[in-house]
Image: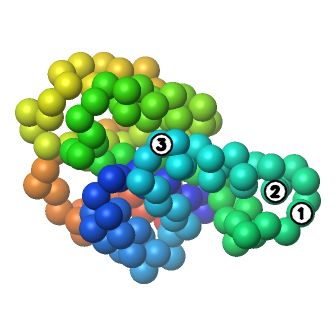
Amino acid sequence: MPGVLIISRDWQSRALLRAQLIEESCDVLAFVSPEQARAALAKVERSKGEGQKSKLKSRSTFSPGLVIADISAVSDRGEIERLASLARSLPADAPLWVIASRGEPGEGWIELLREAHLEEVFFRPIDGGELVARIKSRIGG
């Protein structure tokens, strides 16, 4: 089953969604920023190519099938652009879902992300159980 890549600066939201998905037997990686996610995925790719054991050996088969980004804590356009760049670098069958607050600063972020496989936008408040069910349905779980 494809994995879920979570990006959120808010550790509580990130940890809660990760825990819920793990409870549902989903393969999950969670990071604070798009840069951290990109670096970790690059290590996974290198370890696959080298056939070496690595600290990420349990993750070496991780294949993102969905990216979920919480942009509520993001205040600058640069972070949105880095998220879009990361999402564009992944296969097209790994869409981007965004969790945001209504009236999020930085108007135009939806347009920036639309070009990066943006598939869904969820505005707060959201039902965590419903979100997990939709994620499982999307990745085939």
Residue for point 60% across, 37% down: 90
Residue 3 in the image: above or below residue 86: below
Upstream in sequence: badge 3 or badge 2 = 3
Image coords of residue 114 (percent x, y):
37, 24
* C-alpha separation, residue under disc 3 versus residue under disc 2: 20 Å
Q: Is residue 9 left or right of residue 32?
A: left
- Circle 2 is placed at which residue position? 47
Looking at the image, which is closer to me, 101 or 131?
A: 101
What is the distance, in whole Å, between disc 1 and disc 2 at their CAs?
6 Å
Residue 56 found in image quarter: bottom right
Name the element at disc 3: helix
Which secondary structure, mark 2? Answer: helix
Q: Position of residue 11 (x, y in %)?
A: 32, 64
Q: Which residue is mark 3?
A: 34
Q: Amino acid at mark 2?
A: Ser
Residue 52 image label: 1
The part of the image, by quadrant, that contains residue 134 is: bottom left
Q: Amino acid at mark 3?
A: Pro
Front-most of residues 130 and 62: 62
Front residue of 132/55: it is 55
Cα–Cα gap, marks 3 and 1: 25 Å
Badge 1 amino acid:
Gln
The answer to whether the residue labelled 1 contacts the one labelled 2, judged by CB atoms less than 8 Å apart, is yes
Q: Can residue 132 be seen at all in this image of the molecule?
A: no
Mark 3 residue crowding within 10 angstroms, few (<14) / some (14–19) / many (20+): many
Asked if disc 3 and disc 2 are in contact, CB closer than 8 Å, the reply is: no
In this picture, residue 133 sits left or right of residue 47:
left
Q: Residue at x 87, y 50 (%)?
A: 49
**Which corner quadrant holds the N terminus?**
bottom right
| Residue projecting furthest to the bottom | 23
